[in-house]
Image (cartoon, helix red, strand yellow):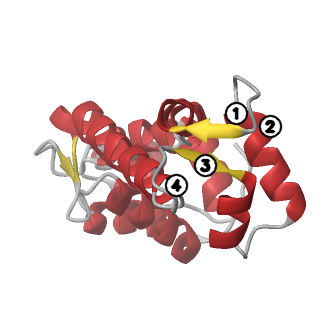
Amino acid sequence: MRALALALLLATPATAGDPAAVPVTPQLERLLQAGPDEALDMITALMQRIDRADGIVLATLSADRDTARERRIARAVDSLVTLDKSGDGVLTRLEVAQQRSDWSASHLETFFAEFDTDKTGRVDRDEIETGVRLRAEEVGSTALLEDLAGWDLDEDGIVTPAEVEAVLRAQPVGTEG
């Protein structure tokens, strides 16, 4: 018993630098179920999505995320606007069907049902931008990026890919929290 007490007293306490001691939220726990390699790929993709492949800068995370989101929205709007081959500033079903042959008929109908808010059968740039903004997918990735803030092992304000990998490799795989 005395040896156990001595071992506990001498044990190094978990510190911020201990990858096994970082907080693992339920969302990250679910991500880890796929295994460390898959989780690392997912987190790396999220880092690239906010244009921070070299690491998440905690102080600018919100601004980085917002900037990247605006860029994605602008690209999506631009890609849809380019479908307007007549140059009249609106998309018709025919223009979209001709330019997006990879879309099924149901996809085309869904697009017009959701984006053609004034129900004219034509989608203008304002409707495109509004539709894209409403569908800008950020919900899960935002929470995940914020969860990673606790993974800054060297406490320099940046969660690097190496820190993410160290944490993922230190976590038990396949356990429920």
What is the three-letter code of the residue carrying label 2?
A: Ala
Secondary element at tag 1:
loop
Marks 2 and 3, the one that precedes in the sequence: 3
Point out the residue furthest to the right here.
Answer: 106
Q: CA distance from mark 1 to mark 3?
A: 10 Å
Q: Which residue is mark 1?
A: 116
Q: Which residue is mark 3?
A: 91
Q: CA distance from mark 2 to mark 4?
A: 15 Å
- Kindly report which numbered mark, 3 or 4, lies closer to the viewer in this rendering: 3
Point out the residue furthest to the top here.
Answer: 118
Q: CA distance from mark 3 to mark 4?
A: 8 Å
What is the three-letter code of the residue carrying label 1?
A: Asp
**Any mark on residue 113, and which?**
2
Front-most of 177 and 112? 112
Q: Quadrant of residue 175?
A: bottom right
Secondary element at tag 2:
helix
Task: Find out whether the residues at labels 2 and 1 contact each other: C-beta distance under 8 Å.
Answer: yes
What is the three-letter code of the residue carrying label 4?
A: Leu
